[in-house]
Amino acid sequence: MRNTDRENVQEHSHMVAVLAHALAVIRRDVLGIDCSPDAAAAQALFHDAPEIITGDMPTPVKYYDENMVSAYRRVEENAVRKLTEALPQVMRPEYERLMSGRTGLEDIVKAADKLSAYIKCLEELKTGNGEFKSAAESTLDKLRAMEMPEVEYFIENFIPAFEKTLDELGL
């Protein structure tokens, strides 16, 4: 869709890391479930690192069918391997784990990624870009379908601020 404000992978990864950290804090401090916000943020920072090599594939194409999902997974695994091979041997396991998303916090990072997409839709709608209306609705539906209490808490307590301008927030 046409964006009024383009976002690069670095900006997106930072936003997802901030959101993953917040979701992990909610899980730990609000819900009382053991969770590491720092680990969630670290994984989120690297969640799209393979795109350095693969580029960004549109979601409808990436998830078209099981064959496409399987093929893209192999391409991503190859990209992770190439990226980690560029590192000193001693550092490879940690970065392979982060880029492959094997930290045990995949649900938090996936939710943060989806929240980032939803917030992007809200920002586009604030600029008058109506193309994002149905995307915002379907993304919110997908977030709610995750049935994660930390996501619901975030939506209830933080999303209203994203729907306001800085003037409306009094900042």
Image: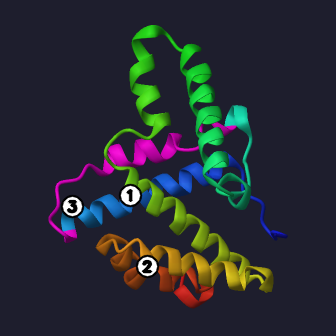
Q: Relative to 9, does residue 153 appear above or below in the rendering?
A: below
- Which mark's residue is nearer the viewer, 1 or 3? 1
Report the side of 170 relative to 155 (left or right): right
Q: Which residue is drawn at the image coordinates 63% and 80% (left, top)?
A: 136
Pick whichever of labels 1 and 2 is earlier in the sequence: 1
Q: Is residue 119 magenta?
A: no
Q: Which residue is drawn at the image coordinates 41% and 71% (left, top)?
A: 146
**Placement of the N terminus among the 4 image quadrants:** bottom right
Point out which mark residue 28 bears.
3
What whole-number distance in Å separates the C-alpha atoms at marks 1 and 2? 14 Å
What whole-number distance in Å separates the C-alpha atoms at marks 3 and 2? 20 Å
Q: What element carries label 3?
A: helix
Report the side of 35 relative to 144 (left or right): left
What amino acid is found at the position of numbered circle 2 in the picture? Arg
Q: Relative to 140, does residue 54 appear above or below in the rendering?
A: above
Task: Pick out the residue farthest to the top.
Answer: 89
Task: Pick out the residue farthest to the right.
Answer: 2
Pick whichever of labels 3 and 2 is earlier in the sequence: 3
Q: Which residue is drawn at the image coordinates 59% and 73% (left, top)?
A: 119
What amino acid is found at the position of numbered circle 3 in the picture? Arg
Q: Nearer the viewer, residue 127 or 65?
A: 65
Circle 2 residue: 144
Q: Report crowding for label 3: few under 14, some 14 to 19, many 20 or more residues within 10 A (C-alpha).
A: some
Q: What stretch is highlighted in magenta?
A: 30-51
